[in-house]
Image: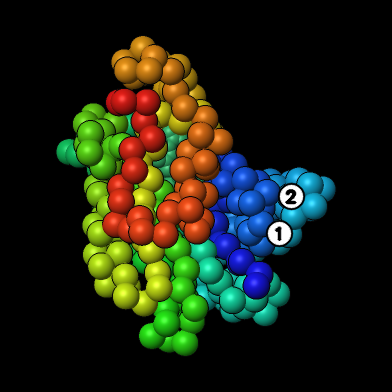
Amino acid sequence: MEKVLLITGASRGIGAACARLAARQGWTVAVNYASRADAAQAVVDDIRAAGGRAEAFQADMRDETQIVSMFEAIDTHLGRLRGLVNNAGVVDVPARVDQMSRERLLRMFDINVLGAFSCTREAVRRMSTKHGGTGGAIVNVSSAAARLGAAGQYVDYAAAKGAMDVLTVGLAREVAAEGIRVNAVRPGLIETDIHASGGLPDRVRDLAPGVPMLRGGTAEEVAEAIVWLLSDASPYTTMSLLEISGGR
Ligand code: NAP
C-alpha cells in the first residue's frame, strides 16, 4: 500500500532533507511550502529524479482554509495519509520578553503552534482507526530551545516549542490505541536558513564552541531521526522527545 507523508515546511532546511530521505525509504511525499514554490519544486524534482514520488502543496500555516484545502488535495492526488511531520517553523529577531509586541507573539504562535494543531487534527481524522483509518505516525519538530528557554533571544519561540512538546505527550496518549504514534525531535543548532531569517546568519558558527560535540548539526542528521520515528522500525516508540543537539 502507498505510504503517503506530509511534511510541512519541506521546501528548505530540515523539512527538505526529511522529504528527500523519506522518499528514498519509500514514502510518497507531500512537500508543503508557504511562499518558496521554486524551492519546493526543486525538492520534488530531486525526489522524482531519484525515482521517488512527490508533489508540492502550498499552504500557509497561518491560514486554516489553506491547510484544510491542502489535506483535501493530498487525499485526491496522493491517497490516504500515513505520516505527518509538523516541521514548518519560524524564529524572530532577538529580543527580550519585555520588548515583545503582541503582533510578534501572534505570528510566532500562529505559525509554530496553531498551524501544527490544525494539521494534526486533519491527520488524525485520516489516520485514526476510530475514524476508519489504518493508523500512522506523527513527528513534531520541537527544539532544544524548549528546554533551554532561549533567554535574551527568543523566549517566545522556546515557549511555542514547549507547546509542541506538550502536544506530543498529550496526543500520543490520546491516540495510542487508535494506531497512531506521536513523537517529537528536539534539534539543537542546525545549519539552515532559519538563523539568517532571524538576523543571525553566523549563529551556529558562533555558538558551536559551546556544544559538547563542538559543532552544529546538519539537516540530514535531524532527518535520519525523523524518518526513523515515522518508520515501522520504531513500532513501540511513542511520546518520545528525542534530543538531536550534540549534547547541548
Ligand atoms: P528554514 O530553513 O528556515 O525552513 C523553514 C521552512 O518552513 C521552509 O520550508 C518554509 O517555507 C516553511 N515555512 C515558514 N513559514 C511557514 C508558514 N507560515 N507556513 C508554511 N510553511 C512555512 O527552517 P529549519 O531550520 O529547517 O527549521 C525547520 C524546523 O526545525 C522549524 O520548526 C524550526 O523551529 C525547527 N528547528 C530548527 C533548528 C535549527 O537550528 N535550524 C533548531 C531547532 C528546531 P518557504 O520556503 O515557502 O518559506
Using the image, determine if residue 113 lies above or below residue 200: below
Using the image, determine if residue 120 lies above or below residue 164: below
Q: Secondary structure at mark 1?
A: strand
Asked if marks 2 and 1 touch (Cβ < 8 Å), the reply is yes
Q: Would you say 61 lies left or right of 172 here?
A: right
Q: Is mark 1 within 8 Å of ligand 1?
A: no
User: Residue at the location (46% across, 74% down)?
Assistant: 135
Residue positioned most to the left = 98
Q: Position of residue 6 (x, y in %)?
A: 56, 62
Residue 247 visible? The answer is: yes
> On the rendered image, what quadrant is the N terminus found in?
bottom right
Q: Nearer the viewer, residue 194 or 25?
A: 25
Identify the mark nearer the N-term, 2 or 1.
Answer: 2
User: Residue at the location (32% across, 17% down)?
Assistant: 212
Of the residues shown, which amino acid type is indicated by label 1? Ala
> On the rendered image, what quadrant is the C terminus found in?
top left
Of the residues shown, which amino acid type is indicated by label 2? Ile
Q: Would you say 198 lies left or right of 47 here?
A: left
Q: Secondary structure at mark 2?
A: helix
Q: Position of residue 95 (x, y in %)?
A: 28, 33
Q: Position of residue 111 (x, y in %)?
A: 41, 56
Q: Which residue is mark 2?
A: 47
Q: Which residue is mark 1?
A: 54
The Cα–Cα distance between marks 2 and 1, rounded to whole angstroms, is 7 Å
Q: Position of residue 109 (x, y in %)?
A: 33, 55
Q: Nearer the viewer, residue 199 or 226?
A: 226
Q: Nearer the viewer, residue 102 or 227?
A: 227
User: Residue at the location (31% across, 25% down)?
Assistant: 247
